[in-house]
C-alpha cells in the first residue's frame, strides 16, 4: 500500500539588540518525500533553541558589545523510536566585538552521534558502530575585514569518537588596491584514535579582481594531502548593460599523487543572459 509522509515545522523568533532567542521544532516522517526538494536525513524530529545575551557595556569604551550564549542546541531523535540520532550543544562564556570591527569568542561544545554501522574514516582506521559523546573547546578571532590586511584564526580541540581531534585554521587577506585582492588559508586536523593517528592538511588561495562594477571575477585553488588533488576554479562575470550577464567558468582537477601532476578533469561552463521586451 502506498504511504504518504508528512513534515512539520514550528518556529519562533525574538530578535533583539540585547536578548536574542529562537526555537524550532522540525519533523519529517519516515515516508515523507519532497520530490523536488532535498532532505539531509529522514524519519527524524529536531529540537533547536538559541539564546544569546548581547549587552553594550559603557564602561568599556573599545567594546561594541559582549556576547554570551547560555544555550544553543540541535537535538535529533528518530521519529519512529525516539532514539538519539545526534546532538550538538554550545555554551559561550565569553565573546565580544570591538568598535573597530574585531571579533572574539570562546566556546564550550558538547555533542553526540549514534552510528548505525562501522565506517572507515581513514586508510585502515575504522570507527565501530555505537553512540559517541564529545566535549570540545573552541577559540575564534577575526580582525576587521574592511582593512587592507585582515586575518582570521580558529582552533577547536577535544574528544573525537574513541580518541581526540585538534583542528586549527587560519586565513590572511591582502587588498592590494581597489581592483585586486589576495587571500590564503590553511587548515589542519590532527586526529588520534585508539587504532592509530593521522593528520589532514588543506591549503587554499584566492585572487579576486574587479576592473569595474561590470567586469569582475576570481581565481581559486585548493589542495589537501589526503586526496592529493588540486581543485582549481576560474570565474569571470561581465555585465555589458543592465539585466544582461555573461558568465565564464573553468573548473579543473589536478592529480598530485605522482611526481608529474596529471590534469584529471576539466569542465568549462558559459552562460549568457540577455533580457528583451516584446
Image: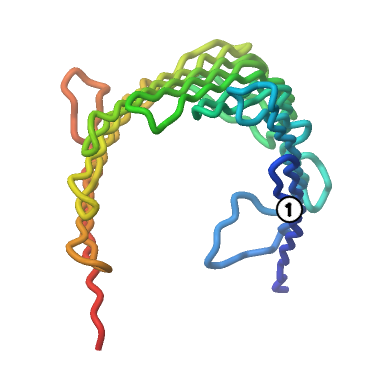
Quadrant of the rendered image containing residue 174 = top left
Residue 184 x %, y %:
33, 25
Specify whether 203 is left or right of 62. left
Report helix, strand or loop for mark 1.
strand
Residue lying furthest bottom in this view?
Answer: 278
Residue 47 x %, y %:
77, 47
Would you say residue 88 is visible in this rendering? Answer: no
Q: Relative to 274, is 166 above or below? A: above
Would you say residue 255 is visible in this rendering? Answer: yes
Q: Nearer the viewer, residue 173 or 187?
A: 173
Residue highlighted by disc 1:
13
Q: Which of 38 and 13 is in front in this view?
A: 13
Quadrant of the rendered image containing residue 172 = top left
Residue occupying the point 21% across, 55% down? 214
Q: In which quarter of the image is the C terminus?
A: bottom left
Q: Which of 65 and 167 is in front in this view?
A: 65
Residue 79 x %, y %:
78, 52
Specify whether 274 is left or right of 1. left
Residue 4 x %, y %:
71, 71
Amino acid at each position: 500500500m502506498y504511504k504518504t509522509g508528512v513534515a512539520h515545522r514550528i518556529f519562533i523568533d525574538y530578535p533583539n539588540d540585547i536578548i536574542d532567542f529562537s526555537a524550532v521544532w522540525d519533523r519529517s516522517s519516515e515516508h515523507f518525500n519532497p520530490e523536488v526538494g532535498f532532505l539531509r536525513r529522514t524519519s527524524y524530529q529536531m529540537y533547536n533553541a538559541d539564546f544569546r545575551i548581547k549587552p553594550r557595556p559603557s564602561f568599556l569604551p573599545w567594546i561594541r558589545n559582549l556576547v554570551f550564549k547560555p544555550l544553543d542546541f540541535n537535538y535529533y531523535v528518530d521519529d519512529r523510536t525516539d532514539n538519539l540520532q545526534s546532538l550538538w550543544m554550545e555554551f559561550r562564556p565569553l565573546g565580544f566585538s570591538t568598535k573597530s570591527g574585531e571579533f572574539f569568542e570562546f566556546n564550550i561544545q558538547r555533542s553526540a552521534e549514534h552510528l548505525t554501522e562501522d565506517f572507515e574514516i581513514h586508510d585502515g582506521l575504522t570507527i565501530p558502530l555505537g553512540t559517541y559523546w564529545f566535549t570540545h573547546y573552541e577559540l575564534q578571532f577575526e580582525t576587521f575585514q574592511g582593512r587592507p590586511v585582515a586575518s582570521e584564526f580558529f582552533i577547536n580541540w577535544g574528544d573525537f569518537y574513541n580518541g581526540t581531534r585538534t583542528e586549527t585554521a587560519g586565513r590572511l587577506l591582502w587588498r592590494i588596491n581597489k581592483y585586486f585582492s589576495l587571500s590564503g588559508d590553511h587548515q589542519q586536523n590532527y586526529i588520534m584514535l585508539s587504532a592509530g593517528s593521522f593528520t589532514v592538511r588543506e591549503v587554499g588561495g584566492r585572487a579576486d579582481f574587479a576592473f569595474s562594477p561590470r567586469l569582475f571575477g576570481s581565481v581559486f585553488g585548493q589542495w589537501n594531502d589526503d586526496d592529493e588533488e588540486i581543485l582549481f576554479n576560474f570565474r569571470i562575470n561581465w555585465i555589458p548593460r543592465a539585466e544582461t550577464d555573461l558568465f565564464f567558468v573553468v573548473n579543473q582537477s589536478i592529480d598530485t599523487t605522482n611526481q608529474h601532476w596529471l590534469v584529471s578533469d576539466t569542465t568549462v561552463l558559459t552562460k549568457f543572459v540577455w533580457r528583451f521586451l516584446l
